[in-house]
């Protein structure tokens, strides 16, 4: 029996969850779907400057899991940018933090912003 997946800790859903070329109709067959946990690894590592180890601690998962999620997220970003596809952020196996700083680290978007 396979081991159950760990829920990944995410501080907030993205403010915008759809990106793409201007003036192009949205075609579901031509879209790239990034999960919320993939988005969170991109946010923490590329925007907040976390190491993969720090990202893993923040998300409450292993560093090797972060490495795999991050690699997949970057491939999806590249596909959307290079091929002019719509990028949609949705789904995944994650838990949102409560925005109160309990269990959140320095990269939490919700803590102190009144979005809780």
Image (cartoon, rainbow, N blue to C red):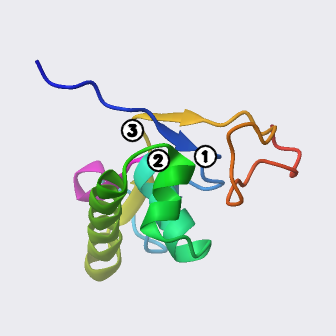
Task: Indicate the quadrant containing the C terminus: top left, top right, bottom left or bottom right.
Answer: top right
To which residue does mark 2 refer?
36
Query: Is residue 22 within the magenta segment?
Result: no
Q: Is residue 70 left or right of residue 105?
A: left
Q: Is residue 100 left or right of residue 76?
A: right
The magenta region covers 28-35
Query: How far is disc 1 from disc 2 in space, using C-alphas?
Result: 7 Å
The furthest residue to the left: 1
Q: Answer whether labels 3 and 2 touch (C-beta < 8 Å).
A: yes
Q: Position of residue 33 (x, y in %)?
A: 34, 52
Residue occupying the point 47% across, 66% down: 42
Q: Position of residue 92 (x, y in %)?
A: 39, 38
Element assignment for label 2: helix
Element assignment for label 1: loop
To which residue does mark 3 refer?
92
Q: Position of residue 113 (x, y in %)?
A: 86, 52
Q: Which of the marked residues, 1 or 2, is nearer the chain's N terminus? A: 1
Q: Is residue 59 left or right of residue 4?
A: right
Q: Position of residue 9 (x, y in %)?
A: 53, 41
Query: Is residue 31 within the magenta segment?
Result: yes
Q: Kindly indicate the quadrant of the structure image that contains residue 100.
A: top right
Residue occupying the point 43% across, 33% down: 7
Q: Which of the marked residues, 1 or 3, is nearer the chain's N terminus? A: 1
Q: Which of the marked residues, 3 or 2, is nearer the chain's N terminus? A: 2
Q: Is residue 6 above or below residue 35?
A: above
To which residue does mark 1 refer?
13
């Amino acid at each position: 029996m396979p081991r159950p997946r760990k829920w990944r800790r995410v501080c907030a859903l993205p403010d915008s969850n759809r990106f793409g070329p201007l003036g192009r109709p949205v075609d579901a067959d031509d879209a790239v779907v990034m999960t919320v946990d993939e988005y969170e690894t991109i946010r923490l590592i590329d925007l907040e400057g976390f190491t993969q180890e720090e990202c893993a601690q923040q998300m409450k998962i292993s560093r090797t899991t972060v490495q795999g999620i991050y690699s997949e997220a970057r491939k999806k970003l590249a596909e959307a940018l290079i091929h002019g596809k719509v990028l949609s952020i949705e789904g995944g196996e994650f838990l949102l933090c409560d925005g109160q700083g309990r269990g959140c680290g320095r990269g939490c978007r919700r803590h102190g912003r009144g979005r809780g």
